[in-house]
Image (tube, grey):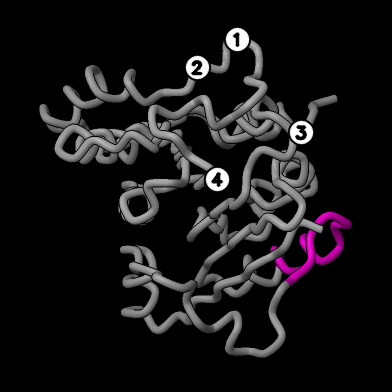
Amino acid sequence: MATGRDNQRSFFGRRKGKTLRPKQRQAVDDVLPLYRIDISGPSPADAAGLFEADVDRMRLEIGFGGGEHFLHRAAEQPETGFIGVEPFVNGMAKCAAALAEEPLRNVRLFDEEAALLLDWLPENSVDHVDLLYPDPWPKKRHWKRRFVNEESLDRLARVLKPGGVFCFASDIDTYVNWTLLHCRSHPAFAWRAETAQDWRRPYPGWPGTRYEAKAVREDRTPAYLTFRRV
């Protein structure tokens, strides 16, 4: 029988799209190794030690695309350690190229499936997790491939500190409803919304993403869900 990790590996392995530009290829070869987290060894006792900078909080973004939101947040919060997960080679290459231009000491990267990293990180080590405009797998027969599922929520619950938050944004109403149902049925998560505006309004300091811009152009309404780790 396949385990949750086996299922994750089937859908979140490293993927490649268009041929990388020379600058991006060089960034993958030269820059990514400087930021990549190596999980071949034991989990660190203190995750803050993963960063060059002195950090007092840790934030994780799963599936950051080209890294626009991820790098924006990291630059504005130098006291927070940011880990970005993106198995899509082209997205990671774009992020690495940006870091070649403007290095950040509070950033680490992981280019494999998120489940592997979540199993390796220390318990109660993360303050904030972002899952922003993930692949919606819109066809019903593919819904089981969505990142939000019982196994993933168990992993997030293990690494999130009590009181930590899990932010989920999407413009696909079936995935929004799916996430609400899964998180509200999980004992470790509580939805923080009190009014409709709480999920219609972008997060504080929200810089926007290209996925969000596309959704608005195509008349889809984004939703911004925030769950607290109880």
User: Of circles 4 and 1, which is in front?
Assistant: 4
* Mark 1 to mark 3 CA distance (whole Å): 22 Å
Number of the label disc, if any, that sits on residue 57 = 4
Q: Earlier in the sequence, mark 3 or mark 4?
A: 3
The local secondary structure at tag 3 comes to helix
What residue is shown with label 2? 38
Q: Position of residue 129 (x, y in %)?
A: 58, 51
Residue extent of the magenta highlight: 178-191
What amino acid is at disc 3?
Gly
Q: Which residue is mark 3?
A: 4
Amino acid type, callout 2: Asp
Whether residue 141 appears in this view of the structure is no
Q: Position of residue 52 (x, y in %)?
A: 39, 27
Badge 4 element: strand
Does the image show residue 82? Answer: yes
User: Which quadrant of the view contains residue 205?
Assistant: bottom left
Depth check, mark 1 against mark 3: the one in front is 1
In the image, what residue type sits under mark 1? Gly
- Left or right of residue 184, residue 138 in this image: left
Residue picked out by circle 1 = 41
Q: Residue at x 57, y 55 (%)?
A: 137
Residue 9 sits inside the magenta stretch = no
Is 187 included in the stretch rendered in magenta?
yes
Which amino acid is tagged 4? Arg
